[in-house]
Image (cartoon, rainbow, N blue to C red):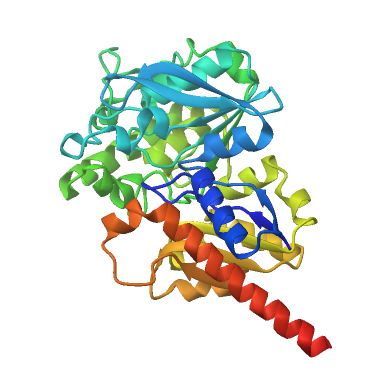
Amino acid sequence: MRILIAPQGFKGCLDAWAVAEAIERGIKTASPAAETILLPIADGGEGTVRALVKATGGQFKRTIVHDPLGGSISAEWGVMGDGCTAVIEMAAASGLQLVEPEKRNPLVTTTYGTGELIKTAVDEGYRRCIIGVGGSATNDGGAGMAQALGIRLLDAGGRDLTWGGASLISLATIDTAGLDQGLRQVEILIASDVTNPLAGPQGASHVYGPQKGATPEMADQLDAALQHYGEVIRDQLGIEIRDRPGAGAAGGLGGGLIAFLNARLVSGAELVLREIGFEKHLKDADVVFTGEGQMDSQTIYGKAPIAVARAAKSSHLPVVAIVGGTSDDHDVVYQHGIDAVISITQRPMDLRVAMEQADALIATAAERAVRLMLIGQGIERRQRG
């Protein structure tokens, strides 16, 4: 039996590689002779850099940049095995996990550090850049990113805007003269599963602002600022981003990347599968294991396990999902290529305890799944005999 193991990370607990290794351990316990292929994946959020770099034999790098509140942080990024493609997670420089809960304030948080990572990659000669945009602490429309790349955002008095989403309401002039010329030759891909527009009821501020610390009043203020920001971009750059699907990703960073760097938005999960050559591994597999921390009805909207399942179904392979937990509406995934969902918890358990024991629980869940598969194989053989 040959098993392709392609989970994403269990958020806040184990990264995708750790999950894959735990699944492999459980499989080998049940069937020592099983052949396994580990190919952890991501959807543009946490784990995207590691998934792409490790799967392609690339290299990891670190750069000192500004964090969301203007402090200093060592941010990890990477280069894929082709030697040409840089991979950046905006969360490494501008992520929510970098800001203590009591200090979260999207009025002032900035994507400047993300811009510094992009500039570093370009300065080192990389002419293709994949940017994962999940997990942001920001709502500045990518303004900080643009400023780090040499673009000046000025108020009516000719003064540079301060960092943060609130200041965008004062934007009067966009001066792109200082934009690094090398960036004009770089292909930028935005890896995301978010389709929200920049502004409006379904925009970045109202939908995602609260988890970044925005009160309802702050969300209204930020939405008005992004509306104005989009209008100035339209009037001065000739690019309409306000209603563009995906422009609201990462607090509007998606829109900023589109407007200033001519970036292209792509499905994060599908991009990762394509870049790591996922389909070529399917022909050598008999079954596919995937997984995520929480499986619910939202999983079908661009999440990595569904992308894995759809690819597996193109090769007529069964798909098992090992998950940390499920919601009452998770069974919709059975209509999208997943054949079985195995939760790692078998008894009532505190979330903290489950996270602490996740490695062992994942292995045990995978073992259970394989033992059931072996029973099925035995029944099939007897029926054939």
- Find residue 70 and report its horizontal and vertical position in percent: 27, 20
The residue depicted at 67 percent of the width and 80 percent of the height is 376
The residue depicted at 33 percent of the width and 32 percent of the height is 140
99 horizontally vs 298: left or right: left
From the viewer's side, name the closer residue of 37 and 31: 31
Q: Would you say residue 148 is visible in this rendering?
A: yes
Dividing the picture into quadrants, the one containing residue 31 is bottom right
Q: Quadrant of the N terminus?
A: bottom right
From the viewer's side, name the closer residue of 261 and 64: 64
From the viewer's side, name the closer residue of 75 and 231: 75
Q: Would you say residue 338 is visible in this rendering?
A: no
Position above or below: 73 against 336: above
The residue depicted at 43 percent of the width and 56 percent of the height is 360
- Find residue 193 and report its horizontal and vertical position in percent: 50, 50
114 horizontally vs 6: left or right: left
From the viewer's side, name the closer residue of 375 and 127: 375
188 horizontally vs 351: left or right: right
Dividing the picture into quadrants, the one containing residue 330 is bottom left
Q: Quadrant of the C terminus?
A: bottom right
- Find residue 42 and report its horizontal and vertical position in percent: 54, 46
The residue depicted at 22 percent of the width and 40 percent of the height is 221
Position above or below: 201 against 60: below
Direction right: furthest residue: 385
40 horizontally vs 231: left or right: right
- Find residue 179 and report its horizontal and vertical position in percent: 50, 14
* Number of numbered discs overlaid on the protein picture: 0
Position above or below: 261 against 52: above
